[in-house]
Image (cartoon, rainbow, N blue to C red):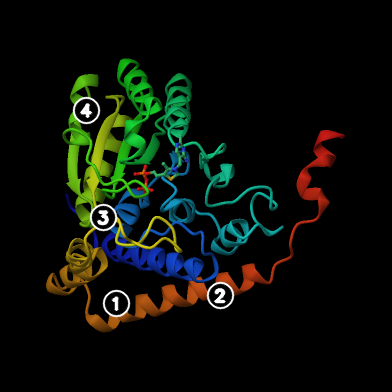
């Protein structure tokens, strides 16, 4: 697939910004569910969507998804910290429920699995409206075993809906590393839709595969299931000791760092030089730092966050 330098550099920037964002929140929130090592999937997935496209993101990467759809970083971070200036006025966390004005579909109850159904519903609405919008339903490998996942895929395939299912397979669910039988991508065959496995640490492979599936959905040819194979090098959440996996396995995946790998590619291809990439790193770090500082000094919500005015209006 032909890609311009602007796209390549934006993918790099989004990966770096995602890592910075993750690190900055992890420093202040011991319960943060980090995504170190999964930036290739996240940036590749969410870059290049249209305004009208709906996204039900996996919770690891949901802030990048909203940011890539145009949401303001300071307000997203304010929302993650429960501040009044968040898109949700402090009513719920923006990393779990992204701003609906950017067509973000949330986790709402906190149950993993139902958002696949919500995204499929959005895709049904797009089809009934006769527009070219697409819904993206992103979920973990643990979540892929939920019944909701199978129901959503079955409906999407049966009704030829414009939805792209992406499994962000980091190979662990809390501390469960037992693999489900066979590749998750292979399940697509049972629903009669294409199923593709892609290297999730290769941002370009993810981006190209997702963009092709999106184009297919926009043409009215129905859903695709993509399994992006990556690895969670961090714990389930910040304060979680990584005792579930051998240290050598984690170290080997750290060696396959998606950002370092893509950086090498950009330099080798002559798209950029080290100095230019350092500049992108510095700017992304600055952007995150400023947004964090502003968000943390934003006011906490008052009783109005309860929405009583709306209830008793
Ligand atoms: C229906 C449901 N069951 C259990 C949980 C508790 N839970 C929260 S995160 C998690 C692990 C999910 O694993 P996976 O889908 O692989 O995502 P990952 O954390 O690996 O990114 C579980 C079981 C939940 N939120 N919802």
Does the beta carbon at disc 3 come under 8 Å from ligand 1? no
Q: Is residue 66 left or right of residue 261?
A: right
Point out the tag, 2 or 3, that comes first from the N-terminus. 3
Numbered disc in front, either 4 or 1: 4
Numbered disc in front, either 2 or 1: 2
Q: Is residue 264 above or below residue 225?
A: below
Q: Is residue 201 left or right of residue 98?
A: left
Q: Residues within 10 Å of mark 3 (few under 14, many from 20)?
A: many
Q: Which residue is mark 4?
A: 187
In what element is the residue under mark 4? helix
Point out the tag, 2 or 1, that comes first from the N-terminus. 1
Q: Which residue is mark 3?
A: 231
Q: Residues within 10 Å of mark 4 (few under 14, many from 20)?
A: some
In what element is the residue under mark 1? helix
Q: Which residue is mark 1?
A: 277
Which mark, residue 232?
none
Q: Are marks 4 and 2 in contact (CB under 8 Å)?
A: no
Residue found farthest to the right: 312
Q: Are marks 2 and 1 in contact (CB under 8 Å)?
A: no
On the image, the x and y values in percent for residue 216 come to 26, 32
Numbered disc in front, either 2 or 3: 3
Point out the tag, 4 or 1, that comes first from the N-terminus. 4
- Decide which of 266, 176 is in the foreground and name it: 176
Q: Residues within 10 Å of mark 1 (few under 14, many from 20)?
A: some
Point out the tag, 4 or 2, that comes first from the N-terminus. 4
Point out the tag, 3 or 1, that comes first from the N-terminus. 3
On the image, the x and y values in percent for residue 286 come to 48, 77
Point out the tag, 4 or 3, that comes first from the N-terminus. 4
Q: Quadrant of residue 293?
A: bottom right
In what element is the residue under mark 3? loop
Q: Which residue is mark 2?
A: 290
Q: Could you tell me how far apart the alpha carbons at marks 2 and 1 are, in whole angstroms?
A: 20 Å
């Amino acid at each position: 697939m032909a890609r311009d330098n602007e796209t390549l550099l934006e993918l790099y920037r989004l990966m770096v910004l995602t890592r910075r964002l993750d690190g900055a929140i992890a420093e202040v929130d011991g319960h943060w569910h980090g995504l170190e090592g999964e930036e290739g999937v996240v940036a590749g997935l969410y870059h290049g969507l249209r305004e009208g496209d709906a996204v039900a993101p996996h919770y690891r990467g949901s802030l990048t998804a909203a940011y890539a759809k145009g949401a303001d970083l300071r307000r997203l971070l304010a929302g993650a910290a429960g501040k009044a200036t968040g898109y949700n006025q402090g009513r719920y966390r923006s990393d779990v429920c992204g701003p609906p004005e950017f067509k973000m579909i949330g986790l709402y109850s906190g149950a993993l699995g139902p958002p696949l159904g919500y995204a499929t519903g959005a895709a049904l609405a797009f089809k009934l409206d006769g527009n070219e919008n697409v819904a993206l339903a992103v979920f973990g490998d643990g979540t892929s075993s939920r019944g909701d996942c199978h129901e959503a895929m079955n409906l999407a395939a049966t009704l030829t809906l414009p939805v792209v299912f992406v499994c962000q397979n980091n190979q662990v669910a809390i501390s469960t590393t037992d693999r489900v039988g066979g590749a998750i991508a292979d399940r697509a065959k049972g629903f009669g839709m294409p199923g593709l496995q892609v290297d999730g640490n290769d941002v370009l492979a993810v981006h190209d595969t997702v963009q092709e599936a999106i184009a297919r959905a926009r043409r009215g040819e129905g859903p695709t299931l993509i399994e992006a194979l990556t690895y969670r090098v961090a714990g389930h959440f910040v304060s979680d000791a990584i005792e579930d996996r051998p240290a050598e396995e984690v170290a080997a995946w750290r060696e396959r760092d998606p950002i370092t790998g893509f950086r090498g590619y950009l330099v080798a291809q002559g798209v950029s030089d080290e100095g230019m990439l350092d500049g992108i790193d510095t700017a992304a770090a600055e952007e995150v730092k400023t947004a964090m500082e502003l968000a943390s000094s934003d006011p906490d919500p008052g009783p109005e966050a309860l929405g009583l005015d709306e209830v008793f209006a």
